[in-house]
Amino acid sequence: MIGGHLAMAAGLALAMQSEKQSAVSLAFFGDGTLGSGDLHETMHIAGMWGLPLILVCENNGWEMSTPWSKVRKTRALIPYAEPFGFATRNVDGNDALDVYQAARWARATALGGQPVFLDCFTFRFGLYSSHFGEVRPGIDEELQEWEKRDPLKRMADWLIAHHVVSADDLERMRQEEEAILEKTFEQVRAEVKQ
Amino acid sequence: MTTLTYRDAVAKALQDSMRDEPRLIIIGQNLTGHALKQLADTYGAERVRDSSISESAMVGMAVGAAMKGMKVVVMIAYADIASVCHMAIVQSAAKLHYLTNGRLNCPVLIRLPIARFRGHGPEGNEIAASWFYNVPDLNIVMPGSASEAYWNFREALQRPTPTLFFEDRSIHSRAGEIAANNSGGRAQITRSGDKLTIIAAGRTAALAEDAADELAKQGNRGAVEVVSLGFIKPLDSQKVFQAASKTGRVLIVQDEPAWSGYAPYLRCLLDELPAGKLAVAPLILAGADQYLPFYDEKPFLPSLESVIAAARQVMK
């Protein structure tokens, strides 16, 4: 269950701390999970016990088709995490390098005895789930703005600008990956048919 | 052989488990300063942990620790509070083994003491066992004696799926001999008889024993066989069938109302006996179909008198 998994992540951290392992436990969740009691209970205990736990919120500002402003007071989740004793950081969730740096900081902090909350701002382009098919009317401007901050495009631009790869390299790699995916899909489909 | 009170038997099971299982930890309230001070002093703050009153997270965290190979005892204040952590019990704990295709075990024991006859009132005196009865992979224990309290606790921590441990506070002072060995969670025949079989668990198993003894004094010596289930899930159906067939007359006693729980389940199970094995249909003596008031729980639950009366009725 969403929310329940956070307590389980804290339990992993509990095991690591009890057995003095040099390890951290990390869990992802969306900003909608603020509604789950288990998030608060988990932060409550993890904060007091100083567990090596990193909570990563993929904060895209939407609970299915409901915007954040209808369900909570602030876009950021940090004000909800800080009082429990978590070290917190606001992260550009669409910048792979910012996320990377934040993760390194988070690991060091958590190993040092304080759990961490990474509030990663991002955006959701598509549906929450094909299962529900919910709609979000009137978000065309937002979509356009966030398209400019597409994380994959930004990473690609950075790699090319820093001469790590060329645009052709990236296109070739993309096609190779797609071919692998297609082949695997067909293999599995064939197996399932048997 | 050692004789202990039911209360001391549970305490000893916990102590011996902490000694024998180096990866066992306990989570609860008021442990290090009070309830388990000795264990905390012996094994340290890593293994005996005071948490806030956050049952859902306590159970969820126990599951997470179990995922890393630890065993956990979670101490919940009383059985009624099981509903507060229902999600963690069912979705996180009970399903772990199945969801991971058997690769991860969940040796988590959740202590849920039944606050019987303590004036806790309706939001505190429930048993809750039957609310979880239909959950697959969940072990449910209602020890009826000191020996069951000790061995069922130890057995539970060896199982790959979690256990709800419903000790009953009202029989905490009841003393008994602790069996020499673990019977692996099998039901116990605590009284031998040839005219009537009473099947029960927990407090009602103790009542059944007292009823058998009282009936013996009143001229029915050797009449009543008592099956104390211990583990109400999974249930020792083999012993149930044996004991039922032996006498041909069955009385099932449970404290919870009879809409669900081991009593209606057993009556269904006994339908599988060949026709004629039982002289009469099994009788269920259960708690009243209502909440239990603060001022007096006794009128709404099985008692020594009502068990004896029901026993006489089935033996007629």
Image (cartoon, rainbow, N blue to C red):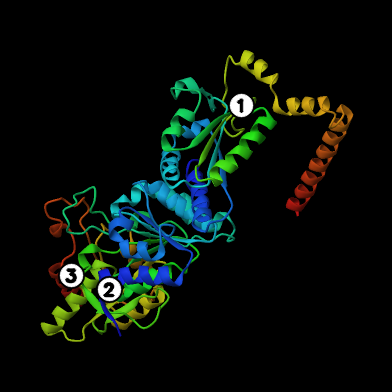
Quarter of the image that includes the N terminus of chain B: bottom left
Provide the secondary structure element on which disc 3 rests: helix
Provide the secondary structure element on which disc 1 rests: loop
In front of the other: A157 or B173? A157
Indicate whether A115 appears above or below B106: above
Q: Which residue is mark 1?
A: A122
Q: Which residue is mark 3?
A: B307
What number is the disc on residue B315? none
Callout 2–callout 1 Cβ contact below 8 Å:
no
Query: Which is more foreground, mark 1 or mark 3?
Result: 1
Whether residue B271 is visible to the viewer of this picture, yes or no, is no
Q: Is residue B134 left or right of residue B168?
A: right
Provide the secondary structure element on which disc 2 rests: loop
Q: Amino acid at mark 1?
A: Thr
Q: Amino acid at mark 2?
A: Ser
Quarter of the image that includes the C terminus of chain B: bottom left
Rendered image quadrant of residue A28: top right
- The reply to whether label 2 and label 1 mark residues of one chain is no
Q: Residue furthest front?
A: A112
Q: Chain of mark 2?
A: B
Indicate which disc, 3 or 2, sits on the residue closer to the N terminus.
2
> What x and y, as percent, mark residue B266?
34, 67
Indicate whether A147 appears above or below B190: above
Q: Chain of mark 1?
A: A
> What x and y, as percent, mark residue A8?
50, 49
Q: CA distance from mark 2 to mark 1?
A: 58 Å
